[in-house]
Every structure is written in C-alpha cells, then in structure tokens.
Amino acid sequence: MKTVSQSVPRAPGALPLLGHLWPLWRDPLAFVTGLRATGELVRVDIGTMPIYFVTSAELANDVMVRRARSFEKGRLYDRMRPALGSGLATAPTEVHRRHRRLMQPMFHHAKVAQYAETLTEHAQGLADSLEPGRTVPLLEVTTEYSIGTLMATMFSISTDAGRHAAEVVQRRMPVMFKYMLLRPLMPKLLDRLPIPANRAFDAANAEISAVVYEVISAARAQGDHDEPNLLSMLLAARDADTGEALTDEEVHNELMTLFVAGVDTVAAILSWAFHEIATHPEVEERLLEEIDTVVGGPSSARAVSFEDIPKLEYTRQVIDETMRLHAVTMLMRRTVEPVEIGGATVPAGAEFGISLYGIHRDPGVFEDPTRFDPDRWLPERRRDLPREAYLLFGAGARKCIGDTVALTQLVITLATVLRTRRLRPVPGKAPAEAVSAMPQPVGLSMTVEARSS
Ligand code: HEM
C-alpha cells in the first residue's frame, strides 16, 4: 500500500503558506466541483492544513458507510459544538449513538403524518401571504416561513413561553446563520476576539439558547407530554437499556441542532425550487397539471393532505432535481485510525471533505449535470443510477434524521402555494449562489401572480 504523500494528488493552484485559500475564497463551489479532474481523493490545503476531498459517490460511501467506524465528524462540527452543544449533528460517536436511537422514532413516517396538518396550515399561510402583484425577496420569505413551521412542529407556540420563543428565534436566527459557517473556517483563537461578527453571533446564540431553556421548563412544568410535537417527545423519550431520560441541557442541544439543521436547508431548497420552476416553463406546466389533478385547481377549497404526497410524483421529482443541483456544499469527517482508502493509507487525525454539491454534478453519473431535468428521477431512469449516487441527505449512521420531515414539508409547500399562485422571475435578476450549508440564492426576487381557475 502506498503512503498518503505518494499517492494522493494535490489540487492545482496552491500558494506557499496560503495553500488553496485563494481559489476557495474566489469561487468555492467551482473549486470543489473542479477537484474531480485531479482524482477521486484529492488533497486541498487550507493554509498549511491538508483536507482530503473525496470527489466520487463511491468513495463518499466508503467514508460515510463502509469505513464509517474509522471516522468521526471532524473540524467543522468541533468548531460548532461550543455554540450548539452536543446535539445529533455535532455529538461525538458515543453520545450520538444513544441520542439517535432515542430520537429516531420521532422522525418515522407515522409520526411525521401527525405534523402534516401543521405543515399544511403553515404552507397555506405562506400562500396567503404572497400577495399578487408584489415582488418579494424569496430567500427572506422562505427563511421566515421555515423557522415558523419548524418551531410549530417542535413545541407549542400557543403558550406564553412558546410565543416569546417564537418571536426571539424568528428575529435572531438569521443573525446566527449569517456567521455559522464562517466561524469553523476561521482559526479558533479568533472566536474570542470582540469583533462585530463574534459579538453578533454570541448575542444571538445566547438569546435563542435562553428562550429554548424557557420553553423546556414551561413544558416540564406543564407536565403534559402528550401533545404531538418534538419537544414533548424528547421529554418523554427513555433510553431502551437504562430507562434514562434526557437532561434539560441535552434537550436544549437537540432543539438548537434541529433549528440549525432544519431551517437554512429547507429555505434554500424551496427558494431554488420556485426559481427553477419559473425558469423552466415546460416543468411548470406539468407540475401545475399534476397539482390540479391531485389536489384540485385554484378554486378548490381542499387543503393538501398527507395522503396526497405519494400521488404528487412529479412534484417530488422536481424537489429531488432541485436538491441535486443545489446540494449541501460540504460535509466533513476525521480519521480516528489509519485508513486505506482510494488506494492510499491516510493517517489518523486527517480531515476529510465530502462535497455533495460536487458529487451530484459528476458527469460520469448524471448526464449533462448542470441541466435542470426532473425526469432524471423517473422510476425507470432512477433505476439506472448507481444506488450510492443518491446522497442528498448524506448516508450511513449520520444520515439526515429529518429527511422525511423535509420532503413532506417541501411537497406540501410546493403543492399548496402553486395551487393558487405563480412566482415569476424578475427579468435580468438571476440569483447568485452564496456559499452556506446549502448554496443560497442571493438576490432572488420573484413577482407573485394569482392563478386563475
Ligand atoms: C432539504 C432539507 C435538508 C437537507 C438537504 C439536509 C441534509 C442533511 C445532510 C446531508 C446531513 C448529513 C450530515 C453529515 O453527514 O455530516 C444531515 C444531517 C442532519 N439533519 Fe438534515 N437536511 C435537511 C433538512 C433537515 C430537517 C428539516 C431537519 C430537522 C427537522 C434536519 C435535521 C438533521 C439532523 C439532526 C442531522 C444530524 C443527524 C445525525 O448526525 O444523526 N435536516 N442533513
């Protein structure tokens, strides 16, 4: 077996001391997508720190599934932990295993069916708020919407503590998101500097954290954990072996993690979906036809139901294709022991990068990969794709726990909004892709039209 230094090629364009910081800073998405040209496992230097990028779905599955025992979560998550605590996304392996087992049932299909009504109500609220004739900043609208919807599935927003928390999270979460991804990439010692970015992040984080504790105390005091929301289930959950419940701090960390994992992602995909639909008239036409057939046209008073979801097949294809083209920018892992991978032995402590964005644009797997083509996800064409190539929610033990919630919410939202509204692009204003957990469509404004029956 070759050693890592002999066999892992380095991406071109490194500068002394800076490594690949310049091309990464200039156009990160193009840089990570272009790494494939160098190989399946490619070394990238962030300053003097090497990160080993896997560029194929097969190697990504090696890291996340087949050799998962040799990896832990790595730097990105270490650096988020002081702010978020040890929730599922950031927890070390042992804590993760216990909490995941405890929380998995809360995200099962049958449980998600219980929140479907809440999801529909919020989607209808979004449709009603989109006044015909107005031009709206779409990402702001979908972010506010996904914060509100996730909160309503998490805890009761009709109590005083719930109402207060909802108001604070709605106001402060966008500030936290703004700095969330920047911090892990900065040297650790910069965290404590009283620069505006740190002050804004710390203040927003502290305020949200305080109201989340308030909501937990109120729910515990109320003692009624029967209401079907995530908080009541977290409070009622018991470890199958020890019978232990989660502490307030653990519940807090999980709620904070769900906010961070479940808001930005859904908001970005929804915004991109509306943009892609509006700029592909043939897709829009088929989609509206399906929604009208399954749910009823603009004059139908019936709300989209959980039972409609399997029938909204093309809607789901549009969502999958939007998620493929605008996939999660990057996941990270770190080796806990020497690992043989991609023809090399990589030592313990090596940081790995997995760009789902780059992998889902691999022309060897997805023909004409930059084309928006929802028919790639037709059952007969999907069968031809390698099973491992569908990584939109990650894979293995750390795969997204919220995938069913997210897909349910996305289908319900598209069907509910598009039943009565069309969103039109503003001419000459194509959105730019800004790097965040998911690429964000910055500058995306769309004009609302009412659909006539
Ligand atoms: C379109 C929307 C979403 C996308 C694309 C997405 C994507 C992902 C991906 C790729 C991971 C794997 C991270 C890794 O391996 O390092 C992940 C993890 C996670 N996601 Fe999602 N997610 C979405 C929505 C949600 C929602 C709505 C929730 C919560 C309600 C959620 C909660 C989580 C949590 C808690 C984890 C950590 C799981 C663990 O490590 O056990 N996500 N997500």
Image (cartoon, grey):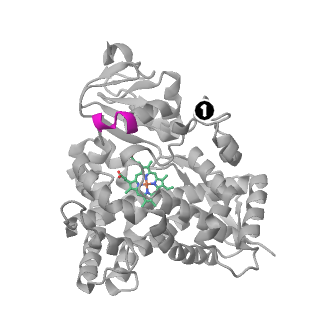
**Please, is residue 103 above or below residue 50 in the view?**
below
Residue 186 visible to an observer of this rendering = no
Residue 139 position (above or below residue 73): below
Q: Is residue 385 above or below residue 129?
A: above
Q: Decide if residue 400 is on the left or right side of residue 140.
A: left
**Residue to which mark 1 is pinned:** 365
Provide residue 446's location: percent of width, then percent of height: 66, 62
Q: Quadrant of residue 142?
A: bottom right
Helix, strand or loop for the magenta stretch, by majority: helix
Q: Nearer the viewer, residue 443 or 164?
A: 164
- Left or right: residue 181 versus residue 304 is left
**Residue sitting at 26 percent across and 67 percent down?**
251
Q: Position of residue 136 (x, y in %)?
A: 62, 67
Q: Residue at x 38, y 63 (%)?
A: 105
Residue 181, percent across and down?
A: 37, 49
First to last magenta residue range: 65-71
Magenta stretch contains residue 68: yes
Q: Is residue 424 magenta?
A: no
